[in-house]
Image (cartoon, helix red, strand yellow):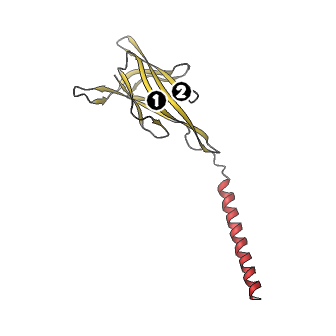
Amino acid sequence: MLRNAIIMLLKKRFNFAAILYATVLLLSSCSSNGCYEDMSVKLYANFYTINLNGKAVAVQMDSITVKGVGSDSILYQNKTLSGFVLDLNTNATQTQFLVTTQQNGFLFVDTLTLEHQNAPWFQSMECGCRVFSTLKGCRVNGVIFKSASIADSAVINLKSEHVRLIL
């Protein structure tokens, strides 16, 4: 009789634990909230000049226009900027941007070339995949910038200076 009572008690506890576990599992797996995260991964490039002591000093530039090479869209048009935020081409290992500025009636043009390796990263079912990149190289070709250097090669979802552009 005592044995039957213990078995009944264990069955009730097992059923309660199983129901509790199933409820928690179902509630955690059902998400109708969607994706509220920004899935884009941005590259941050800032402008510097070298002072008389040889130190890099952040500067702003007037009348900057930036567009992607091979793209119709203009990312910045006639803006005063101390740097820009760019998207890398996730389907290529090289992304180029055309940078122009107009000073004293003259148009100055430069091309910023970024070489990168892409790594897709699965975020979640709702959000899908985001692409992180590792900068392998950067260079400028024109008259606006003297040089470009990599400050942080890991282009992930953190706001960090990735490229330094020296005027």
Quarter that holds the C terminus: top left
Q: Nearer the viewer, residue 135 or 34?
A: 135
The quarter of the picture where residue 52 lies is top left
What label sits on residue 12 in the rendered view? none
Q: Is residue 154 left or right of residue 57?
A: right
Which corner quadrant of the image does residue 61 belong to?
A: top left
Q: Are marks 1 and 2 in contact (CB under 8 Å)?
A: yes
State the image quarter where residue 101 is shown.
Answer: top left
Label of residue 93 in the image: 2
The correct choice, above or below, for 93 with respect to 22 in the image is above
The secondary element bearing badge 2 is classed as loop
Q: Position of residue 146 (x, y in %)?
A: 35, 20
| Residue at x 42%, y 22% (from the top left corner) | 139
Q: Residue at x 50, y 40 (%)?
A: 157
Residue identifier under label 1 = 136
Q: Is residue 80 left or right of residue 53?
A: right
Mark 2 belongs to which amino acid? Thr
Whether residue 106 sits left or right of residue 158 in the image: it is: left
